[in-house]
Amino acid sequence: MSSLHTLSLAAVRDKLASGEVSPTMVVEAALARIEATEPTIRACITVCAAEARAEAARLEQEAAAAPVDFAEKPLWGG
């Protein structure tokens, strides 16, 4: 999703929470944007792409291992 850079952080957070995008997708979009604009902007002294990708992968593994919460409602009146 290459248009992630046009969204607010709150919108990206919401897309992450809904599962519409993954942490890896967000990181890759940010890295692509840095690569595309850095020669002109020259704002980044160091880009830690490997570390960002590793953290995104860790977050995805952590989310996959998390238990799913659900509410149980009794089928009878109590």
Image: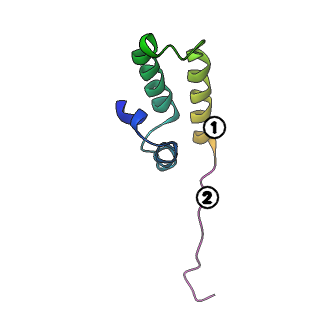
Determine which of the numbered discs, if any, sits on residue 54 in the image: none
Quadrant (top left/top right/bottom left/bottom right) for the C terminus: bottom right
Q: Which mark is residue 69?
A: 2
User: Which residue is under mark 1?
Assistant: 62
**Does residue 50 sit above or below 22 in this rendering?**
above
Please provide percent x and percent y for residue 50: 58, 15
The prevailing secondary structure element of the residues shown in magenta is loop
Quick one: SS at disc 1? Answer: helix
Whether residue 70 appears in magenta in the rendering, the answer is: yes
Give the residue type that dot 2 points to.
Asp
In the image, residue 77 sits, relative to residue 22, either above or below, namely below
Tell me which numbered mark, 1 or 2, is placed earlier along the sequence. Answer: 1
Q: Is residue 42 left or right of residue 40?
A: right
The answer to whether marks 1 and 2 mark residues whose Cβ atoms lie closer than 8 Å is: no
Q: Position of residue 47 (x, y in %)?
A: 57, 15
Q: Residues within 10 Å of mark 1 (few under 14, many from 20)?
A: few
- What amino acid is labelled 1 in the image? Glu
Outermost residue to the front = 41
- Which quarter of the picture shows residue 74? bottom right
Is residue 15 shown left or right of residue 1?
right
Q: Position of residue 19 (x, y in %)?
A: 46, 45
Judge by depth and name the residue closer to the eye, 32 or 74: 32
Residue at 49 percent of width and 49 percent of height = 14
At x 47%, y 21%, the residue is 31
Whole-percent x, y for residue 76 in the image: 57, 86
Q: Viewer-proximal residue, 78 or 47? A: 47
Which class describes the residues within 10 Å of circle 2: few (<14), some (14-19), or many (20+)? Answer: few
Q: Dividing the image into 4 quarters, which one contains the N terminus?
A: top left
SS at badge 2: loop
Q: Which residues are magenta?
A: 67-78
11 in relation to 54, above or below: below
